Amino acid sequence: MVQMTCPVCKNRCLLTVEQNGSDILVQGNKCARGELHAREELEGKSKIVTYHASTCFEQVPSVEVKTTSIVPTELVFRLIRLIKKEKITRPMARGEVLLHHPLGLETDVVIDSDALEHLS
């Protein structure tokens, strides 16, 4: 049995995943995307990437970001290097796109925090 916090949506469900041979049982998900995420994590083929991006604001020197969908495992570190190069210079809302289709992927990197919304 494996437990993980699902990063796919704002619910942050605590997933319990059990594997018995080829059968995978996922519990605790409030949406279908959570079950898909757990299965893909268990198979190790792809991941939702969560990281932090630097800002120019003293009050909030970095902010959490995540991909909107899965990223193949072999591209995770290349994507993190791209995120590290970014510097946020304006207030941004949760869900706002920081990087659109990085590395040609069908995913975006979005802000995953409310910390920047009210800065100026």
Image: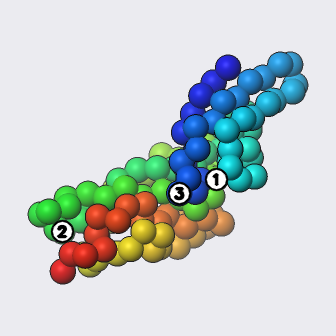
Task: Identify the residue position indicated by label 1 in the image.
Answer: 70
Find numbered disc 3 in the image and state the secondary structure of the residue it sits on.
loop
Q: Is residue 51 left or right of residue 60?
A: right
At 58% from the left and 44% from the top, the residue drawn is 13
Question: Which numbered circle lies on residue 56?
Answer: 2
Find numbered disc 2 in the image and state the secondary structure of the residue it sits on.
loop
Rendered view: 35 above or below 31:
above
- Real-space CA distance between mark 1 and mark 3, rounded to the nearest whole angstrom: 16 Å
**Residue 82 x %, y %:** 41, 59
Q: How would you rate the neighbour count of disc 3 (Cα within 10 Å): few for under 14, some for 14-19, many for 20 or more?
A: few
- Real-space CA distance between mark 2 and mark 1, rounded to the nearest whole angstrom: 28 Å
Question: Which numbered circle lies on residue 10?
Answer: 3
First in sequence: mark 1 vs mark 3 = 3
Q: Is residue 71 left or right of residue 40?
A: left
Q: Tell me whether circle 2 and circle 1 mark residues in contact (CB < 8 Å).
A: no
Amino acid type of the residue that numbered disc 1 sits on in the rendered structure: Ile
At 70% from the left and 29% from the top, the residue drawn is 17
- Real-space CA distance between mark 2 and mark 3, rounded to the nearest whole angstrom: 26 Å
Rendered view: 61 above or below 6:
below
**Residue 1 x %, y %:** 67, 20
Amino acid type of the residue that numbered disc 2 sits on in the rendered structure: Cys
Q: Nearer the viewer, residue 120 or 66?
A: 120
First in sequence: mark 2 vs mark 1 = 2
